[in-house]
Amino acid sequence: MTNKINIVLVHGAWADGSSWNKVINILSADYNVFATQHQLTSLQDDAESTRRLIEAQQGKTVLVGHSYGGAVITEAAHYCATVKGLVYIAAFAPDAGENLIDLSQHSKQAPGNAAVYPDKYERLWISKEKFHAAFCADAENDEATIMAAVQKPISMQCFSDKITTAGWKNLPCWYQISDDDKMIAPELEKFMADRMNAKKIIHLNASHASMFSHSSEVAELIKEACTYQS
């Protein structure tokens, strides 16, 4: 039995749990840290796999979502009473009845979307040649090469599925805006952070993959959310 707060890190599109490696190394000494490995098949499937990971832990849990993972934690938050806070890292935060397509109407299209293309199975990929510039411009070259090679495509359904309950309406929230984000427009991130009345909003001069280039700052924001629970 441990009294450590649980942190569940939820990855987004074109990524997996290893996208949190640097943040995990910083947080693991003081918290029980877990990262999801969901399929990016549908919002409900991904929220369910997140719920199961939360349910497997004892004690209070803080959910952290990056990119599409923000939609996942928004949906999954109400499944478990042990969830006590939400942290959004350059992430989507839809309202109930809203999907990611709806949210995109609140800002101009992010330029990185031009690098996204579908395959015949209705899965979306980022061009390997454009991945570094679009997804993680401030990552090291070797990091970007690996991320592009192991990217996990996302189903188109994930963008059209609607949120049933917006967890951010009932829980304290924190938000990190990436000011050089090419995948989600920074003004859209600000809109979502302001709408949820986040307890703290931080701006980083970062790409979409801020957990790589600014892992210390991202980890500190997560720690603040955990300290709020103690």
Image (spheres, rainbow, N blue to C red):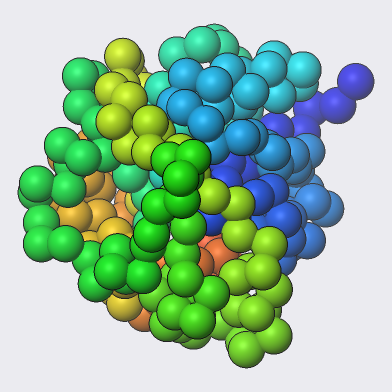
Quadrant in which the C terminus is drawn: top right
Q: Is residue 110 above or below residue 63?
A: below
Horizontal side, residue 199 vs residue 46: left or right: left
Residue 129 versus residue 163: which sits nearer the camera?
A: 129
Residue shown at the point (26%, 39%) measured from the top left? 100
Residue shown at the point (23%, 20%) measured from the top left? 96
Residue 13 versus residue 66: which sits nearer the camera?
A: 13
Residue 200 versus residue 179: which sits nearer the camera?
A: 179
Horizontal side, residue 219 vs residue 170: left or right: right
Give coordinates of residue 104: x percent, y percent: 17, 48
Q: Is residue 118 at all visible to an observer of this figure?
A: yes
Q: Is residue 65 at all visible to an observer of this figure?
A: no
Residue farthest right in this picture: 1
Residue shown at the point (46%, 51%) measured from the top left? 119
Residue 197 versus residue 21: which sits nearer the camera?
A: 21
Give coordinates of residue 95: x percent, y percent: 22, 27
Q: Is residue 222 above or below residue 7?
A: below
Give coordinates of residue 48: x percent, y percent: 58, 18
Q: Is residue 170 above or below residue 181?
A: above
Q: How many marks overall?
A: 0
Q: Quadrant of residue 160?
A: top left
Give coordinates of residue 75: x percent, y percent: 41, 22
Q: Quadrant of residue 39?
A: top right
Residue shown at the point (68%, 17%) measured from the top left? 52
Quadrant in which the N terminus is drawn: top right
